[in-house]
Image (cartoon, helix red, strand yellow):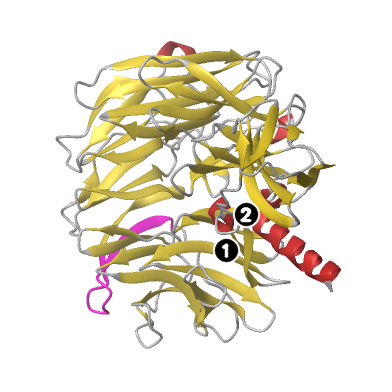
Amino acid sequence: MKTKLLLILFALFISKVNAQQLIYDFSPGNAQFFKKFDQKIYFQGYDTNNGRALWQSDGTADNTFLFKDTDSRNDYIGTIGTGSAILNNTFYFIASDENSAGEIWKTDGTDAGTVKVTNFINERVTTLTTAGNSIYFLIKKEDDKLEVWKTDGTDSGTVLVKEISSIWNTPTFEGQCNNIFIFSIQPANTSDSRVWRSDGTSAGTFPVTEQMDGNGSGLVGGSGGTSILTQFIEYNNKLYFASRHFLFETDGTLENTKKVATVRNPSVGGLVHYDDVIAVDGNLYLMFVSLKNFTNSTGSIEILKFSTINNSIVQVYKQQIDKYFSASNLTKIGNSLVFTISNATEGTELVSLNLANNVVSNLGELAVLNDLDEFQIPFNTQVSTLKFNENQYFIHGAIDKDDNRKGWIYDSNLKTLENIPNLDNIRLPFEFNNYLYYSKDDKFWKYGNNLNTEFFTKDSRLTIYPNPSSNYVKITTINNESVQNVQVFDINGKLVISKSNSNEINISYLNAGTYFAKIQIDGKWINKKIIKT
């Protein structure tokens, strides 16, 4: 009986250490296209019993369920990520039904309040954008002409705003600025893009830029091209975006749409493989990554700082690179920007750039030399960083040559970077209520180190010091009780240290990170955390 009880306690310990909870098993289906609305998660769920349908979850296993089956054929729920919008506390999304491959629906969060809005789209719309009191969408016709539509959620309020000239490909940006709908298209028979605006009237729908080319890093639906404009970001009632060589701003009006800075030298081409932009304290930080390839013997990473106050622009970081590595997005952590570079051993390193003095510090290596398949560069392989609680960030590694993506947790308080095998090869990670949610192995999961906080005791009978430590930790007890047994587990539940009759633990050979110790004194087990630096 005692052995059975210990096994149960051990299993509970491992489950807590893993900090992972199963929300719903869709096997052999999946969960995808997650969107947060009114403290709920809406997504497309697919299982053998229900096919594809709209599901709802509050983030717990007990309250995750099929919310609305719009189609008895179990055919299609649109890409809720871009094919959804919120207007007047109502959630709009695209889904199929018995009569159409995809129409706009709306819901107030109740079954009775979930109704179809349109009857004519038939899967021709992929993106919904809220601007002012309307939701805008674009329809490309069979003759390649583009229609601008808006809806207020009613049949009479769903109207054609304007038909404009023919385009190639699909619109590459749809957003808003000052309640004006902004979109970017590639005019037919050109290799350029042009930015348009609409206030919901025919007269107020017109282009605000001339035709211009992009820098080659833009991606739409997994495909790229030099026509795509990039780095769209709304900040302080202005929308900024980049062409191949210049940064532009607009407030949605023709007269206030202008070039504000040069971001790439026009004399050296200006093409890049990856870009990003982030706004911090009145400044835009623009990243441009060009990689070594058949035409470039070396590449570079460059970060520019643009002041939205006086339009000045300066370089704050540049590195020449001659090996393949995984570029990343820019993430603000404290007073620093975190991103990846190519390190001295030709691996991919996570670093932080101090915004006060532009000093770069290494945080940890994400991939070693030759981990990456050069032929996958640059598409769909970048590293991404996602904050999911006050001090923890999920790092989604790049796709390696074996088609795997490692998952990492960076703790900004402890300054630790750890690979978490449970987070390897996850899909569509997102934050909800300070936890990380994701799909993996046909299941919907929840992760967070704070899942295990209730398990670690505050028993004052023993202390561990120094903690954090890089070499040894010592266990002291109030009444000098003997330490009978010590077991140390890593964050994935793997036993890494086991010893008896000793109050000193050598952790010098362990990787930096968080570990969990089970310590037995006077026949009782006490659980503590150990931080290895």
The quadrant where residue 313 appears: top left
**How far apart are the alpha carbons under marks 2 and 1?**
8 Å
- Residue at the image point whose x is 70% and y is 59% from the top: 13
Looking at the rendered structure, which numbered label has been put on residue 32? 1
Task: Tell me the SS state at disc 1.
Answer: strand
Residue 197 in picture, x, y percent from top left: 25, 48
| Magenta stretch bounds | 143-160
Q: Is residue 6 left or right of residue 171?
A: right
Above/below status of 419 relative to 9: above
Task: Tell me the SS state at disc 2.
Answer: strand
The residue that disc 2 covers is: 427
- Residue at the image point whose x is 51% and y is 54% from the top: 430
Above/below status of 23 relative to 186: below
- Taking the magenta stretch, the answer to whether it contains residue 125 is no
Q: Is residue 379 left or right of residue 106?
A: right
Residue in front for this viewpoint, 413 or 89: 413
- Residue at the image point whose x is 49% and y is 30% from the top: 338
Q: Is residue 101 visible?
A: no
- Taking the magenta stretch, the answer to whether it contains residue 155 is yes
> For the C terminus, which image quadrant?
top right
> For the N terminus, which image quadrant?
bottom right
Above/below status of 249 relative to 424: above
Looking at the rendered structure, which numbered label has been put on residue 78? none
Q: Residues within 10 Å of mark 2 (few under 14, many from 20)?
A: some
Whether tag 2 and tag 1 are in contact, CB under 8 A, the answer is yes
